Structure formats: C-alpha cells, structure tokens
Amino acid sequence: MKYIMAGIKKVQGIKVDPHFVLLFLVIMFVVLLFAAENVVKTTLIPQ
C-alpha cells in the first residue's frame, strides 16, 4: 500500500496517461483474481 500511495502522490503533479491507468487497472484485477482463487482453494480444499 505504501508503494501505491507514493505512486499516487507522484502522479498527482503529472498528466496521467490513460493507457497507464488502464494497464494499472488490469494488473490490479489480475492480482485480485489470484487472491480470490487462493482464498477459495484454502477454504474449500481442507473440507
């Protein structure tokens, strides 16, 4: 989270490239998918 906040602070003074924002959103979506998959595996497999 610290890195994300630092990145946001840096970007505030700069014009943001829409492609960069889109790429960032895609990366976050993939990370969330992996996290959700891990949660499902850890909760379902022991049962």
Image (cartoon, rainbow, N blue to C red):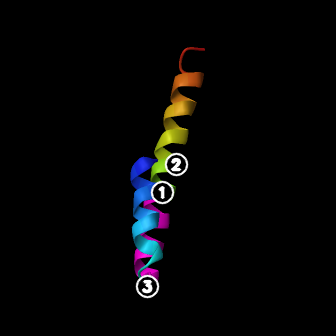
Residue bearing mark 3: 15
Provide the residue span drawn in magenta.
Answer: 15-28
Residue bearing mark 1: 28
Front-most of residues 43 and 20: 20
Of labels 3 and 1, the one closer to you: 3
Residue type, numbered disc 3: Lys
Of labels 3 and 2, the one closer to you: 3
Gap in angstroms between the C-alphas marked 3 and 2: 27 Å
Whether residue 40 is in magenta: the answer is no
Location of the C terminus (image quadrant): top right
Looking at the rendered structure, which numbered label has been put on residue 32? 2
Q: Quadrant of residue 20?
A: bottom left
Front-most of residues 6 and 38: 6
Residue type, numbered disc 1: Met
Q: Quadrant of residue 24?
A: bottom left
In this rendering, is residue 18 above or below 3?
below
Residue type, numbered disc 2: Leu
Left or right of 27? Residue 43 is: right
